[in-house]
Amino acid sequence: MPGLEDLYREIILDHYRSPRNRGELPAPPATRVEGFNPLCGDEIVVFVEVADGAVSDIRIGGQGCSISQSSASMMSAAVKGRTLDEVQALTRSFKAMMSIHEQSLDGEGEVVIEADPDVKLGDLEALRGVVKFPVRIKCATLSWNTLLQAIEESAASR
Amino acid sequence: MAMSVGDPLEVAAIKKDFPILEREVHGGRLVYLDSANTSQKPQAVLDAMDRYYTQSNANVHRGTYLIAEEATAGLEGARAKVARFIGAKRNREVIFTKNATEALNLVAKAWGRAHLQAGDAVVLTELEHHANIVPWHQLAEEVGIELRWIPLGGDGHLDLTHLDRLVDGAKVVSFTAMSNVLGTMLPVERLTAAAHDAGAIAVVDASQHVPHVSTDVSAWGADFVAFTGHKMCGPTGIGVLWGTEAILDDTPPFITGGEMILNVTKEGFTANELPWKFEAGTPPIAEAVGLGAAVDYLSGLGMEAVREHEVSLTGYALRSLTERFGEQIQIHGPSEPAERGGVMSFTYADLHPHDLTQVFDQHGVCVRAGHHCAKVLMRQLGVAATARASLYVYNDEADVDAMADAITDAATFFGV
């Protein structure tokens, strides 16, 4: 049986208790997108500012469990100042760690997302234990999907 | 201790009727406190379904051979048991659906589409489950009905101060008999009378009521009552819509196809009589047999005793949790056990319910966390999520104590 310590690593609890980049950004110029976890009612708000093809600033609002909040906090720290290409690669690697499957290109079944070996996940590695608790994977990925949507909307609005 | 003094149910013996409760999880016993979500099934229900499949499996209403007659008798016998259990006047007023959600959709989409027009008002309450909200939202989009809401008042009860004004001119008043989040028992007869005085029909979502409290749909005087089998010791895949014969006759078919017709030509069809008019396709026969056995099981315990047991155990839970955790625990809903069912939504300090119930799982304690398909209510309560423990016939004080120990463990682990 996976123990609670596998899920709630100390670094996760640290980010939960002292979330980074917590707050709001004026939108516009920032893009504001809400994400919902229909299972547990978690709500996350991502404010992202994109300039010169990079995430120039990011803030996180909303409320949720320690997994969703710490994942959002670590994500905000990891993507701030990164180029959009780097953010995409990081997201892919994170989802790969979460064992997320995606539709294969030929539409026949699903394939596991493959991580880019050059991408370093750093603190985010602490969330690896979530995979042993499948219902919590959605908690961990909520902020990432919300960020991707915010970046998309930000591109569409210019 | 396994049984409290004066408990009208012999819980220690009842626990043995439910094979899943013998299972170990994470090295300890299974403490099941999520019956508002789905109940566990007694051996008698499993045996009845197994007997049906191993001895009598055939399609209903068409074979001329013995086992087909047995299958038909199983289905229709279950309908008669359910009718008696809820005080229906006629068996044909009991429609088998997939679940309560489908039953409520039938009301909104079959009766509603035929009888409601743009501007007509449908009155709901802020306590409703999404199943009694979303179908009406869809109807609002399709035909432009107006939704009105009876607000939440103090202590988990509705605020009925402006009830007459809210139902004035309305066509439908649709409400839960017992909140799936707060356990609040609603004044069904008063709401039904107010609906009828205003010329509206009364629709009752009794999903949390029928399993726990003796129910008499005729005494309620409602027009439609919906509930589901799997929360009352029955299997998944079968629910019930009860309606008066008059209103069911006045409702067009919902799902259509085989079984529900008297005649089909190239030009059109003639619908079958009640109840089959609403039961298109091969019905859930084994599930109906299982539901019939569940009704027998609950009747054997006696619904008065079931209710008494739950009031007493709910009182114990409210008292012991408050004594042990003081202001750290916030339990929502009516403070008086007699005014509520055994459904307790709570939060502990600033711990997210999801994290709380994750620790519960390590103790084998099954409790749901989240918004419980009642986001309108959660917004009124000002919380995003709660943990929800819900009691049934197989729970005792030791189960409540096991959850309390798990709360202590979670508080220690997260340092709150």
Image: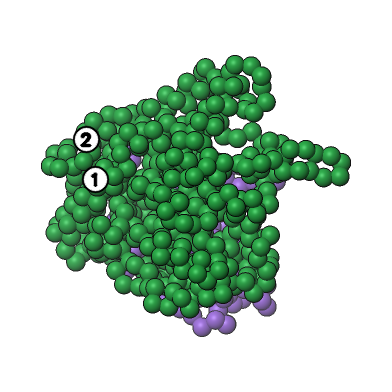
What color does chain A have in the rendering? purple
Q: Report if residue B185 is visible in the image.
A: yes
What is the spatial separation of the Cα atoms under label 2 and label 1, in whole angstroms? 10 Å
Residue at 43% in and 45% down = B86
Picture disc at residue B10: 2
- Splitting the image into 4 quarters, where does residue B329 fall? bottom left
Is residue B359 positioned above or below A37 on the image?
A: above
Residue at 58% in and 63% down = B136
What color does chain B have in the rendering? green
- Splitting the image into 4 quarters, where does residue B269 fall? top right
Is residue B171 positioned above or below A90 on the image?
A: below
Q: Report if residue A142 is visible in the image.
A: no
Picture disc at residue A43: none
Q: Which residue is mark 1?
A: B309
Q: Say which amino acid is labelled 1.
A: His
| Camera-side residue of A47 and B197 | B197
| Camera-side residue of B132 and A47 | B132
| Quarter that holds the C terminus of chain A | bottom right
Residue at 34% in and 67% down = B157
Q: Chain of mark 1?
A: B
On the rendered structure, is B251 left or right of B37?
right
Q: Say which amino acid is labelled 2.
A: Glu
